[in-house]
Amino acid sequence: MKGSLLYEGKAKKVYYVENEPEQLVLSYKNDATAFNGKKKDQFEGKGRLNNLITSKVFEYLKQQGLSSHFIKSLNDTEQLVSKTTIIPLEVVVRNVAAGSITRRLGIKEKEIFSPPLVEFYYKEDELDDPIINDQHALYLTDVKEEEIQFIKETALKINEHLKDLFKQSGLKLVDFKLEFGRLADGTIVLADEISPDTCRLWDENTGEKMDKDVFRENLGDLISVYENILQRLEENTCAK
């Protein structure tokens, strides 16, 4: 089923699917990167955890009526997805102040954003993925104004569903990054992954960081934290 390698990124390898030109296989790697690749390491089992967590999250979003490229999980480290042309925008939704926004704008950490903030970053490693506004996005990418609005509205819908999902698992969704892509017919759908690599999650009771900040800030064992996230999601899913 899995064909030749199409592309290898920081976190995943992308493969063609034999006899299915509009499908791809995503293979999750054990690599961890931070600060746009400036900090790197490998953790045995990380690819499995990100694949299984992302699969559960995308299945949950599908149940809520939200379209994505996700078709199914194939095994511990691989997913079958619809082929998309990724729009070179990172869409960040912020519920609570943390990370770069506190340094960039001098906002105190843990300040609540109501309503949540939606930010765009231009996906370009050589430029360190700079923050941009809507007009920049129109100039730099092929998106139209109505599509920018659609992406923002969809990101906020996803936010509401993810807040519920993680809250049921005892986690606060602080912020997260999304990517969107176009299917062959031009339809824009959610793509990439949703995992502790792309979300900031804090324990509801202790405030403990339960995401890639553990790696960024050398706070503890990344794998045990990600295992904890998966276990909570599995327990929450099984309880329903």
Image (tube, grey):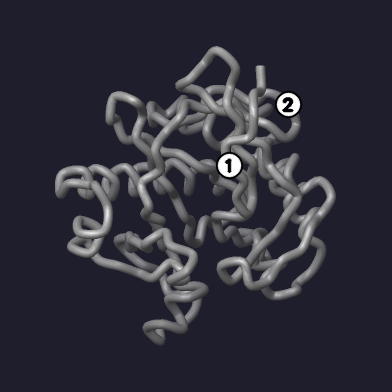
Percent across and percent down for residue 172 are: 55, 57
Label annotation for residue 75: 2
In the displayed image of the protein, which residue is found farthest to the bottom? 106
Q: Residues within 10 Å of mark 2 (few under 14, many from 20)?
A: few
Q: Position of residue 70 (x, y in %)?
A: 51, 29
User: Percent x, y for residue 190?
Assistant: 41, 38
How many numbered discs, if any?
2
Q: Residue at x 20, y 56 (%)?
A: 138
Q: Quadrant of the N terminus?
A: top right
Q: Residue furthest top?
A: 19
Residue 182 quadrant: top left
* 156 relative to 57, above or below: below
Residue furthest right in the image:
44
Residue 202 falls in image quadrant: bottom right
Q: Secondary structure at mark 1?
A: strand
Q: At numbered mark 2, what does the secondary structure look like: helix, strand or loop? A: loop
Q: Is residue 222 above or below residue 161?
A: below
- Please name the amino acid that badge 1 sits on: Tyr
Q: Local crowd at mark 1 within 10 Å, few (<14), some, or many (≥20)?
A: few
The residue that label 1 is drawn on is 7
Query: Quick check: 216 above or below 31?
Result: below
**Which residue is found at the position 68% from the left and 71% from the top?**
39
Q: Residue at x 73, y 51 (%)?
A: 226
Q: Residue at x 47, y 26 (%)?
A: 82
Q: Quadrant of residue 189?
A: top left
In the image: residue 119, left or right of residue 165: left
Mark yes or no: residue 152 visible.
Answer: yes
Tell us which disc is closer to us: 1 or 2: 1
**Label 2 amino acid?**
Asn
Check contact, mark 1 vs mark 2: CB within 8 A: no
